[in-house]
């Protein structure tokens, strides 16, 4: 499959057609005026990754995010992490995602929490970034790599847009003991759009494109498990699809028995 066809399939995996409406309805929002919602109310819904906002906090910690840094959220989903970084650190964030619907939803949610204009969102691929070289202090990719076949292109582009000394931070699920995983998974319905790769191979590609000080922090970062869902509680199924409980169960089991390996990697641009 060529890159264009693959990216179309991936984008369609992240397109329900009515994500904004599903979120507004589920949150029971009558008032959709600018700034009518606080950012925390969206956390159960807008963090499209295992571990919810705890994973995002852990990533910010290992990346040593400081106030005012410029960050590229490469594969930004509906903007949950981008809003967290602006709110918590005053980061200057640009965000990019393959899914037009997710980008639109991110912009709508920015309005709701009063952050329009603080985050610049655009549609595009992490394998061909539309940014000047040496632009960002941090490039941030949270659970995106599993959908990207051409990791060399993705990592080379991250290196190019980082300034010297800048940090690349990513979370990923690597391939574990080689036994087959069960689909659907949160990021893919079949193996056609899933590219886990053994951890050592992933780290080697990051090194090959020119990063140094490459560290996997996954074992040191405590990711709080999501609390049990109460009846009627909202979650990321609103953006990801109603079969998310099954998809989460499949990935959780694969991590528990060693078929998938969670990673949280930082790497520095020399
Ligand atoms: C599991 S979601 C994670 C979203 C977000 N990072 C988060 O953690 O909330 C994966 C995201 O990666 C995006 N994605 C996958 N492949 C991409 C690519 N080649 N370029 C840009 N975005 C991509 C998808 O559209 C989707 O929004």
Image (spheres, grey):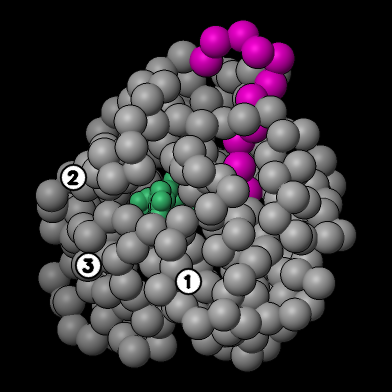
* Element class at badge 2: loop
Q: From the viewer's perspective, is residue 114 above or below residue 29?
A: below
* Residue closest to the eye, 68 or 44: 68
- Give the side of residue 169 with respect to residue 132, left or right: right
Q: Which residues are magenta?
A: 171-181
Q: Position of residue 144 (x, y in %)?
A: 49, 48
Crowding near pointer 2: few (<14 within 10 Å), some, many (20+)? some
Residue drawn at point x = 34 percent, y = 75 percent: 121
Q: Above or below — where is 162 with respect to 100? A: below
Queried whether the magenta region covers residue 266, the answer comes back as no
Q: Is residue 49 above or below residue 231?
A: below
- Residue 176 magenta-drawn? yes
Q: Which residue is mark 3?
A: 104
Quadrant holding the N terminus? top left
Q: Position of residue 119 (x, y in %)?
A: 40, 82
In the image, farthest residue toward the top: 179
User: Is residue 210 depicted above or below 113 in this figure?
Assistant: above
Which label's residue is closer to the chain start, 2 or 1?
2
Label 1: few (<14), some (14–19) or many (≥20) C-alpha neighbours in 10 Å: many
Q: Quadrant of residue 203?
A: top right
Q: Nearer the viewer, residue 256 or 174?
A: 174
Which residue is located at x 83 percent, y 52 percent? 215
Label 1 belongs to which residue?
82
- The residue under label 2 is 16
Q: What element does badge 3 sit on?
A: helix
- Identify the secondary structure beneath mark 1: helix
Distance from Cα at disc 2 to Cα at disc 1: 21 Å
Residue at 22% x, 60% y is 100
Residue at the (86%, 60%) spot, across then down: 213
Q: Is residue 138 left or right of residue 102?
A: right
């Amino acid at each position: 499959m060529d890159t264009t066809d693959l990216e179309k399939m991936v984008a369609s995996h992240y397109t329900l057609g009515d994500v904004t409406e599903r979120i507004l309805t589920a949150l029971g929002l009558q008032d959709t005026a600018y700034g009518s919602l606080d950012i925390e109310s969206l956390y159960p819904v807008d963090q499209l990754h295992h571990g919810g906002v705890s994973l995002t906090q852990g990533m910010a910690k290992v990346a040593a995010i400081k106030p005012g840094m410029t960050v590229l959220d490469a594969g930004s989903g509906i903007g949950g992490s981008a809003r967290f970084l602006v709110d918590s650190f005053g980061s200057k964030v640009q965000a990019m995602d393959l899914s037009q619907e997710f980008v639109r939803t991110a912009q709508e949610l920015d309005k709701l929490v009063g952050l329009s204009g603080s985050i610049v969102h655009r549609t595009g691929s992490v394998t061909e970034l539309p940014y000047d070289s040496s632009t960002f202090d941090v490039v941030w990719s949270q659970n995106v790599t599993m959908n990207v076949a051409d990791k060399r292109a993705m990592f080379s582009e991250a290196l190019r847009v980082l300034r010297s000394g800048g940090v690349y931070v990513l979370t990923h699920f690597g391939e574990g003991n080689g036994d087959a995983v069960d689909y659907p998974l949160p990021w893919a319905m079949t193996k056609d759009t899933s590219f886990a790769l053994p951890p050592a191979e992933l780290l080697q590609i990051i090194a090959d494109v020119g990063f140094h000080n490459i560290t996997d922090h996954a074992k040191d970062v405590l990711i709080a498990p999501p609390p049990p869902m109460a009846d009627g509680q909202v979650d990321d199924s609103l953006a990801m699809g109603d079969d998310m409980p099954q998809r989460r169960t499949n990935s959780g089991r694969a991590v528990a028995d060693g078929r998938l390996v969670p990673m949280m990697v930082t790497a520095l641009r020399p």
